[in-house]
Amino acid sequence: MDFLDRWPIDRVKKMTLKQYVGIRDRDTFCQWVENRTPILGSIRGSNSSKFGIYKRGENSKKSKRLHSDEIYSWQKYYGTSRSAAFKEIQKEILTIIQYAKNEDFRKIDNIHLSQFFKWKIAYLYSNDRLIPIFSTRVLVKIARHYGINATEQTPISEIQQLMIDNKPAHLSVYEFKNYLFEKFGSQGAQERNKRKRKRVLFGIKKGVKRKRIEPQLRSGSRSYIAQQTHNKIQNELKSLLEKKYGRNAVMMEENNVDLKVTLPSEIHLFEVKSHSYAGWCLREALGQILVYSYKEDQEKKHKLFVVGDSLPNSDERRLIGYIKAKMRMEIDYMAIDEVKRKLMST
């Protein structure tokens, strides 16, 4: 089960303190964030006070830095009772989720929850629009590498935006995360993975003698928000195209094409992708949209569009230019906001 299947936003809204944090309960929200999604970025290492409130073990002492009752301890910032504290923490988590969904990351810097915890939550609900590295020490090293004179007081949102702007088009968010952590993490990892980092950064992959056929455990956070994002873009695009060309000209899901516009001498095909990076949208969509074009009326001119949620960074723009130069047909990537501006201006 993926994190977002277990903890959709509606369930977080109804979450109780017992469901939020406990002892030896692997199904709590905090356990899912910390221990059941390590492949999506680790926040292990600091104590349980990072959750804002936690349940103490039988032999655990009450901390003088925290408010406590007979069962729980919590940050003093959140109030004098466990119920009041949990209510405020739950409110902050829901605020983080909303900011993450809206890509309004700068506002997360000012939320009181611990850095590790709040940015892991933000990542899990961001549709991969953040790079899942949460160690301040490592993030500062990365920021300095990319030209910012960062300190531990530098806003995390600023460093996140810097990483997003510099993500190579051919790398997934997980591959880029691994590359950065292997380069700027522990000294031992830096030395061991020096050659591997070079291969990853330039898209070089060694051949293999045989493929594994046994089942492999995979973990992801995309299923819930990715489907929402795809449907949101597809519906908005359909509405925009109908306003421009009329309802009779626009078809959704005909022969599996997300959207098709049929004009007297042209056919426009639109393939929608929910990935948060233009390069990954193109990587997944190109084969599909070319096959769709092959099945259409060849007497008409074809224009192909891959539509995603986010504007391309500089490396992704170079990739788009390369594809357009190599193809013998009109093909382009556009973010949904670009489509909106273009259709409204013509």
Image: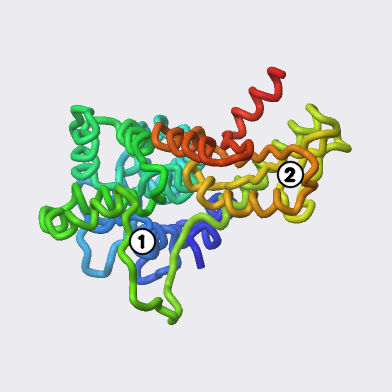
Residue at the (15%, 53%) spot, across then down:
190
Asked if the residue under mark 2 is in contact with the one under mark 1, i.e. CB atoms within 8 Å, the reply is no
User: Mark 1 or mark 2, which is nearer to you?
Assistant: 2
Q: How many C-alpha atoms fall within 10 Å of the one at disc 2: few (<14), some, or many (≥20)?
A: many
- The one nearer the camera, 39 or 249, is 249
Percent coordinates x, y for residue 286 in the rendering: 57, 49
Q: Looking at the rendering, which quadrant does residue 20 occupy?
A: bottom left
Q: Sequence order check: which comes first, mark 1 or mark 2?
A: 1
Residue type indicated by callout 1: Ile
- The one nearer the camera, 238 or 52, is 238
Q: Report whether residue 71 is seen.
A: no
SS type, badge 2: strand
Q: Which residue is mark 1?
A: 39
Q: Which residue is mark 2?
A: 259
Residue at the (51%, 35%) spot, across then down:
325
Residue at the (85%, 31%) spot, across then down:
246
234 lies above or below 215: above
- The one nearer the camera, 70 or 242, is 242
- Distance (Cα) linking label 1 and label 2: 35 Å
Percent coordinates x, y for residue 221 in the rendering: 48, 57
| Tag of residue 235 | none
List the single residue furthest toward the top.
345
Percent coordinates x, y for residue 51 in the rendering: 34, 51
Q: How many C-alpha atoms fall within 10 Å of the one at disc 1: few (<14), some, or many (≥20)?
A: few
Q: Looking at the rendering, which quadrant does residue 192 occupy?
A: bottom left
Residue type indicated by callout 2: Leu
Indicate left or right for 54 with 228 as reference: left
List the single residue furthest toward the bottom.
214
SS type, badge 1: helix
- Which colour scheme appears in the figure? rainbow
Indicate left or right for 115 with 8 as reference: left
Percent coordinates x, y for residue 229 in the rendering: 60, 45
